[in-house]
Image (cartoon, rainbow, N blue to C red):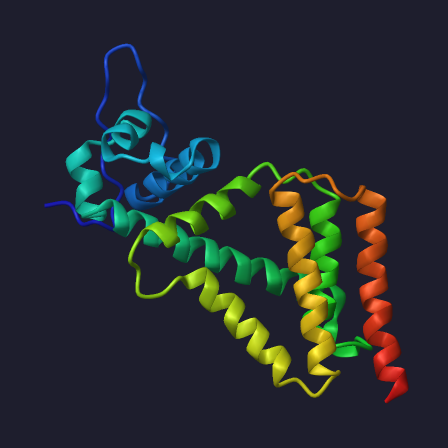
Amino acid sequence: MTKTSEILPIKKKVGRPAKNLNGKTVRQIVLDEARKLVSQHGTDSLSFDRLSKETGIAKGTILYQFKRKEDLLLALLQAHASELEAKFKTVEKKIDTKSSEIDPICATFIEWGKEFVNRQPKESTFGLAIQAAFSETKFPENPINGWFREIFQKVLLSKDSDPEKAIICLLAIQGLFFMDFLQMDALSKEQTLTVLDNLRKFLTDDNKAN
C-alpha cells in the first residue's frame, strides 16, 4: 500500500496528458489546484470531482487526503496563515526592525504595504474567498484570524511605542489592503504610498514626543 507522503501515480485520461508532478506530493498538488480554483471561481467551484478532473488524480486518492470539503478548506486556511507568517518574516528581515525608530511590527507592515501597492495582486481574491468560506463553515478556529490576533496582541503589549497609536497604524494598513482586495480604487498608488509614509511619521513623532 502506498504511503500518503509518497508521490502517487496520476490517472491518465484519453486525449489529456497527465500533469507533471514535479516532485510534489498528491496533497500539495490538490491544494495548489484548489487554491487556483478558489482564486478564479470562489469556494463554490471546489468539488472532489472537479479536482480529480483538473489534476488527473483519482477521486479516491484525493478523498484519502481530505475526507470532506471542510477538511480541504481548513487546509487552505492553514496554508494561507503560514504564507502570511513567512511573508511577514521576510519583510521583517529585509528592513532590520531592530534598528527601527517605531514599533517593529508596524514598521514591517508599513514596508509590506508598500510592496503590496507596487505589485499586481493577481491572487488577492483568494484571501477574501477563503475567509468568506470560514464564515460559512463551523470551524472551531480560523488560522488566519488567529495569526492576526497574535500580531495585534504583540502590539498591544509592546513597549516600543504607544500601543493605541500602533493599533491605529495597523488598522489603517489593513484598510488599505482590503481596499485593494476589493478593487475600490479610492486612492491612487501615489496617494496610498503617501498614507503609508504618513503612518510612519505618525509613530515617529509619537516616539520623539516621549
- The quarter in which the C terminus is drawn is bottom right
Q: Provide residue 39's location: percent of width, then percent of height.
A: 47, 37
Q: Is residue 70 left or right of residue 185?
A: left
- In this rendering, position of residue 163 left or right of residue 152: right
Q: Residue at 85% of width from left, 75% of height from top?
A: 204
Q: Is residue 66 left or right of residue 21?
A: left
Which residue does the image show at 25% across and 45% down from the upper left?
Answer: 69
Is 26 or 67 nearer to us in this picture?
Answer: 67
Residue 83 % position (x, y): 51, 55
Quarter location, residue 175: bottom right
Residue 167 position in % (x across, y down): 67, 73
Q: Is residue 87 in sight in this rendering?
A: yes
- Is residue 25 toward the left or the right of residue 188 in the image? left
- Pick out the residue farthest to the left: 1
The picture quadrant where one finds residue 57 is top left
Q: In the rendered image of this protein, does residue 10 appear above or below residue 118?
A: above
Q: Image height check: is 115 above or below 93?
A: above
Q: Position of residue 190 (x, y in %)?
A: 85, 45
Tell how many labels: 0
Q: Is 28 or 165 nearer to us in this picture? A: 165
In front of the other: 62 or 141: 141
- Vertical position of residue 95 compared to residue 83: above or below: below
| Residue at figure coordinates x 59%, y 36% from the top left | 122
Q: Residue furthest top?
A: 15
Which residue is at a point 38% across and 48% down the rendered structure image?
133
Which is nearer the eye, 84 or 172?
Answer: 172
